Amino acid sequence: MRFLVCICLLFAIASPAQTPSSKIISLDPAFDKLVSPQAKMEILAEGFLWTEGPVWVKDSAFLLFSDVKQNTIFKWKEGTGIRVFLRPSGYTGLLPYSAEPGSNGLLINRAGELVSCEHGDRRIAAMPFKQGGKRTLADNFQGKRFNSPNDIAQGPNGDYYFTDPGYGLPEGKTAMPMGLYRLTSSGKVELIDVYAAPNGVAISADGKRLYLAQSDGEKPVIMLYPLNANGTVGKKKLFFDASELAKQGLQGAPDGLKTDLQGNVFSSGPGGIIVLNASGKLIGRIETGDATSNCAWGDDGSSLYLTVNSRLCRIKTNTRGF
């Protein structure tokens, strides 16, 4: 562990490198306005085991992300590089638990707290940046423990929406229906829908759309739910089917995703990052050259930070994210 951190620190001090395997692929003129054909993906740090859940902390101008396998949240800051921010991040037990015991999805909530999806402790937790430790927001549905909460978003009215697959359980033994859940501001947990492999979740900038990514190899899709002002959701519909990209030999499935202020969706998927317009049309791709788990907006809102297997990467765009 200490060896890996040292690698990251040394790498981050140097000028960010450009990965030669990345590629910008435009499929529509609208994409060129979002991502320049000359844009390059930078490697900011590497040497991790499996990076996930990036989130930008705007007030302090740094990025947090999970290494799920190392049970650690790392902090990256321009000019400073990598530091351990929190360990353990998602499992506080004494015995080995699973291959992915740590935190996964991270979120800065409307109160300015760090909210984490924790595999090993099987809960959603919130932690203020100053004073006090974590508090559990939810750890069960109808009295049964969650499987391994994966990703989370917060709606305009304060309700949370999160996924609970079995990826972080020992031997993948699920205890609960794998699916999309809602945690209301009153603390009530509701099951919205059951999925075979629920993963990333995001909300549009106008607060009227909820997106869910499914990483099922048989049905790699992104679903769309209308989001009502009271936090309830409307009838779901298919937003994007990634199976055609998979048939082209591109590796990966929809995972973490984010939206920009124009209504476009940037999602990890086959080949790296897929970019969809508000109608669900694929308008471009950012090939990363490796398995890509998630993304997050940062800096002034135009930088897209990527968690790419063992690396933390960044690409500058011409749009701004929510």
Image (cartoon, rainbow, N blue to C red):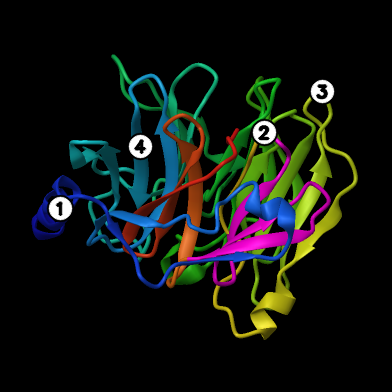
Dot 3 corresponds to which residue? 229
**Mark number for residue 172?**
none
Name the N-terminal-most of marks 4 and 1.
1
| Position of 109 relative to 18 (above/below) | above
Instruction: Name the amino acid, label 1.
Output: Val
Q: Residue at x 90, y 46 (%)?
A: 235
| Position of 195 relative to 123 (above/below) | below
Instruction: Name the amino acid, label 4.
Output: Leu
Q: Secondary structure at mark 3?
A: loop
Dot 1 corresponds to which residue? 5
Instruction: Name the amino acid, label 3.
Output: Ala
What is the residue that sits farthest to the right in this orientation?
235
- Label 1 crowd (10 A; few <14 / some 14-19 / many >=20): some
User: Rounded to the nearest whole Å, what is the CA distance between mark 2 and mark 1?
Assistant: 35 Å
Q: Residue at x 39, y 19 (%)?
A: 59
User: Rounded to the nearest whole Å, what is the CA distance between mark 3 and mark 4?
Assistant: 30 Å
User: Rounded to the nearest whole Å, what is the CA distance between mark 4 and mark 1?
Assistant: 16 Å
Name the N-terminal-most of marks 2 and 3.
3
Q: Is residue 222 magenta?
A: no
Instruction: Name the amino acid, label 2.
Output: Leu
Q: Secondary structure at mark 1?
A: helix
Residue range (magenta): 261-287
Name the N-terminal-most of marks 1 and 3.
1
Taking the image as shown, residue 248 lies to the left or right of residue 120, namely right
Q: Secondary structure at mark 4?
A: strand
User: Rounded to the nearest whole Å, what is the CA distance between mark 4 and mark 2?
Assistant: 20 Å
Name the N-terminal-most of marks 4 and 2.
4
Dot 2 corresponds to which residue? 261
Q: Are marks 1 and 3 in contact (CB under 8 Å)?
A: no
Taking the image as shown, residue 166 lies to the left or right of residue 194, namely left
